[in-house]
Image (spheres, grey):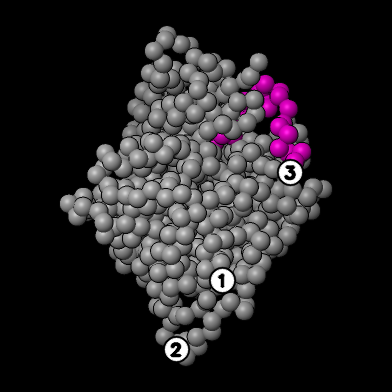
Amino acid sequence: MSCTILGISAFYHDSAAALVVDGTIVAAAQEERFTRIKHDQSFPSNAAKYCMEEAKLNIEDLDHVIFYDKPLLKFERLIETYLSFAPRGFTSFRQSMPIWIKDKLFLNKKLIKELRKLSDKDINPNLLFCEHHLSHAASAFFASPFEDALVLNIDGVGEWATTSIWKGSGNSLELIKKLNFPHSLGLLYSAFTYYCGFKVNSGEYKLMGLAPYGEPKYQDLILEKIIDLKEDGSFRLNMKYFNYCTGLTMINKQFEALFGHKTRALEEKIQQFHMDLAASIQIVLERAVISIVRSLANEFDTANLCLAGGVALNCVANGKLVSLKVFQNLWVQPAAGDAGGAIGAALAAYHIFKKQPRSSCVEEGKDLMVGSYLGPKFTSEEIKGSLKAAGAVYEEYNDRELIEKTVSALKSDHVVGWFQGRMEFGPRALGNRSILASPLSSDMQTKLNLKIKFRESFRPFAPAILFDDLQEWFKLDVASPFMLVTADIQDDKKIDDDSKDQAYIGIERLKRRRSQIQAVTHVDYSARIQTVHKETNFIFYDLLKSFKKATGVPILVNTSFNVRGEPIVNTVADAFKCFMGTEMDLLVVGNFILKKNKQDAALAIDYRNQFEPD
């Protein structure tokens, strides 16, 4: 008899649902993809419905529903923190208590109420709660291809833990050690994200992308004044500079005084100071993560390390771990943030609470994420119906013709919206809900940022590359299917433009000709790499293989199918709307191709202000 478990993460940010049946991840999706609200924190009713439909189940068929953290422990931390800092923080305390008493403290009732809305029967769901960092650890270890591994979780904060280390073996996870709130690498990085004018829990990847434009001038100051980092990776933050314990902001006036600048407003011009600060905190974060990992390697005899928690999405730090080869094998959960907690909670329920064994995937050396393609898909008839309803002009092709025409467009430097198969789970588009372009164009990065994505010009783009060609182009010798590892381009692919070297400082470095694949080479010669594999995404693999045959280059620019502030597109209607609101040239949906110049001009929309900037 099968065991069906629905995992839920909600009410903080990036709500999601995931369905595990007999230890296999059947479906997973973030609520934002359905509501079109970036980082939606509401109960994931749409995502849960999708998961049930994918498995042809009803809510009443479930054995368990499990929530990804324990609200009572989080409330305990909240109360103890306010008491520790009293009378400071009374305003924040007064604002947060009604919310906790009304909703979060009695989450059991709220969850049952929301789940009952998904059924026409009077159901009484069998609810479980999983500690936050256990959800992260389970999402990393149980989904990994390893029978035994250490698991490192680093995030902002769960209930109490901010950094935790687990030992995974078979169907068990044992907590080895942890560091508690308020000392947090995730919150430290978020504090600098906030100070540089980006949104917390949203803009951290921008700070990482900004770092190569600066110099780490403030690294020593940060290590001297803000974080006491030990050789073994343990650390303490100087809370004198932070406000997140009891206030409504991440930092305080003393933090601003330390660096001599006010907090940057959201749309204020980015200065060289912000670039240097980004470079500095990135170096400090990498140093801390590497120290922790080296300490673990010295203490434990294992070849395998798994990563989860929001900090595991820092692909630059991950790239350093790979290049240093501290552990023989590294596996990062692609949905490492809170959304992935839904998967982790469900897997924890199956393996730990139900004591069920791991799947045969581990014996075969495969992970459970199936490329992270766990979201909704659409049949040709459904696609055609959506296109007709939107008033789109389209043509249908067989598989070979579709690839040939798409490659022809890419060779001509056209920008292609690419919508295929099941939607990705996690923050990265991995070739199913992607915007694609040729990496050979010298101005493609600027074109994509300003005319397609409507976002800051400094933002880099990722290369999707055939795995077999990886080492010819990049200094990386392991697969990176989830776009979570950064590596440098090979020296023979670089272009040295030293003629005006002194003029290229800050954002001006974008203008420097630096690579044969300029559009996917960051200003420091690095790239956030996605390796594409025939086994997990045949059509995307085929497209890359055909592009290589036509150009000699096995690489495409791959960025998420959305604009700034918008969640990645989910449906055909979402894709068509984004297509008509940007300067994309071609939209490929299933076996259908839409050319922009063939569409009714009246369907064009002003998409630039449709979404709040992230």
Residue 95: say if magenta: no
Residue drawn at 52 percent across, 26 percent down: 55
- Of 202 and 515, which appears nearest the observer? 515
Residue drawn at 60 percent across, 41 percent down: 369
Q: Which residue is mark 3?
A: 365
- Of 441 and 338, which appears nearest the observer? 441
Whether tag 1 and tag 2 are in contact, CB under 8 A, the answer is no
Q: Which residue is mark 2?
A: 500
Q: Looking at the image, tell me whether mark 3 or mark 2 is earlier in sequence order.
A: 3
The vertical placement of 473 against 159, above or below, is below
Q: Amino acid at mark 3?
A: Gly
**Quadrant including the N terminus:** top right
Whether residue 27 sits left or right of residue 24 in the image: it is left
Residue 355: say if magenta: yes
The answer, for residue 454, to whether it is visible in the render is no
Q: Which residue is mark 1?
A: 552
- Of 246 and 172, which appears nearest the observer? 172
Q: Amino acid at mark 2?
A: Lys
